[in-house]
């Protein structure tokens, strides 16, 4: 499969406290060298939009920005989103995805504590390096908390008004089922269920199908859940078959030091899914057509 039409909507970059293989410039270089269509760049700590603007100004038109609503940017902070708007290339906003909380989601912190981890950043993301904030010092964010409803509503109004993509982050199953219908009711028309097989969320095929039936909702299947979180290719293929390729996107969730690049990850991911019997046309739908549609390409 030609990678030129493939878009990775989940690629981590630095510099940040978590060791990362790429910054925005080197990510753009690698994506170009590998023939990828492009990627949305992510950080758990900050908006990647200013770094993407720098890359764009240097000729890399294959990267877009995102924002994760952890405490590092003020949590469910509408001003953090507004501060990432207005940086454009060829008239196009470079902010594409707003992630709900990841490392500061209540579900994520609960899982980390259950594993005996002392920090919000799991050691398997860092190669064992200790980094992040102690979990007992992080006020957990639950997006269904009534005290956060005003801020959440404003966040969703901005996402809807600007045509951005909402991604569910590391929320619990209960929060996802609260958030997605609310977002749809407020006019958000592009939603990604962030790696729903991940242990913070653990949506079943039936759960995902009930959410994708709302329209404009896609389930993300990420390559990194295999080497980092021990899912098997068969596990992911079962999700794809159960949910349907028309409601699924393939991403890498890569960018860690010592791991593959986005292009290498997508190429291997496609190969593994092909070995699991997923047809070529379905792979093109999930790795190319659906991500391009979400990006507005």
Image: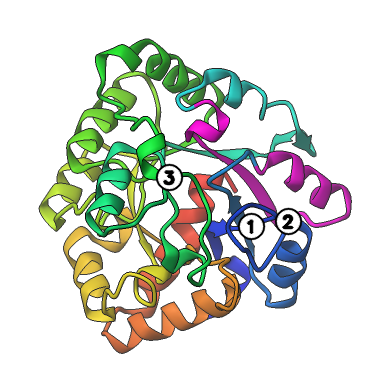
Query: CA separation, marks 3 and 1?
Result: 22 Å
Q: Position of residue 140 (x, y in %)?
A: 33, 33
**What is the span of residues highlighted in magenta in the rendered image?**
48-74
Q: Is residue 274 above or below residue 160?
A: below
Q: Spatial distance from mark 2 to mark 1, Cα to Cα?
A: 7 Å
Q: Secondary structure at mark 3?
A: loop
The answer to whether mark 3 and mark 2 are in CB contact below 8 A is no
Kindly state the secondary structure of the residue where label 1 is placed. Answer: loop
Q: Residue at x 30, y 41 (%)?
A: 171
What is the count of numbered marks?
Answer: 3
The residue wearing badge 1 is: 13
- Element marked by disc 2: helix
Residue furthest bottom as drawn? 275
Q: Residues within 10 Å of mark 1 (few under 14, many from 20)?
A: many
Question: Disc 3 to disc 2, how far (Cα)?
Answer: 28 Å
Name the residue tied to disc 2: 24
Residue shown at 26%/71% (left/top)? Answer: 236
**Would you say the residues marked 2 and 1 are in contact, meaning their CB atoms lie under 8 Å apart?**
yes
Quarter occupied by residue 72: top right
């Amino acid at each position: 499969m030609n990678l030129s039409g493939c878009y990775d909507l989940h690629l981590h970059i630095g510099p940040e406290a978590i060791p990362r293989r790429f910054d925005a410039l080197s990510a753009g270089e690698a994506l170009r060298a590998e023939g990828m269509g492009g990627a949305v760049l992510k950080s758990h700590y900050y908006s990647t939009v200013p770094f993407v603007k720098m890359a764009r100004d240097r000729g890399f038109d294959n990267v877009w920005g995102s924002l994760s609503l952890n405490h590092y940017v003020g949590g469910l902070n509408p001003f953090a989103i507004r501060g990432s708007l207005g940086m454009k290339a060829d008239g196009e906003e470079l902010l594409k995805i707003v992630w709900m909380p990841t490392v500061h989601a209540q579900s994520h912190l609960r899982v980390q504590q259950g594993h005996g981890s002392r920090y919000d950043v799991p050691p398997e993301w860092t190669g064992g390096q200790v980094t992040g904030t102690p979990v007992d010092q992080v006020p957990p964010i639950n997006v269904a908390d009534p005290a956060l409803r005003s801020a959440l509503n404003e966040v969703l109004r901005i996402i809807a008004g600007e045509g951005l993509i909402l991604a569910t982050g590391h929320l619990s199953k209960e929060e996802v089922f609260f958030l997605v219908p609310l977002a749809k009711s407020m006019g958000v028309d592009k939603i990604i269920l962030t790696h729903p097989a991940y242990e913070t969320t653990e949506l079943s095929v039936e759960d995902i199908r009930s959410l994708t039936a709302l329209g404009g909702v896609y389930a993300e299947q990420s390559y990194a859940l295999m080497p980092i979180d021990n899912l098997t290719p068969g596990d992911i293929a079962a999700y794809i078959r159960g949910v349907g390729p028309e409601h699924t996107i393939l991403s890498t969730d890569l960018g860690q030091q010592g791991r593959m690049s986005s292009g290498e990850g997508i190429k291997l991911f496609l190969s593994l899914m092909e070995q699991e019997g997923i047809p070529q046309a379905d792979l093109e739908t999930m790795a190319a057509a659906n991500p391009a549609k979400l990006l507005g390409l």
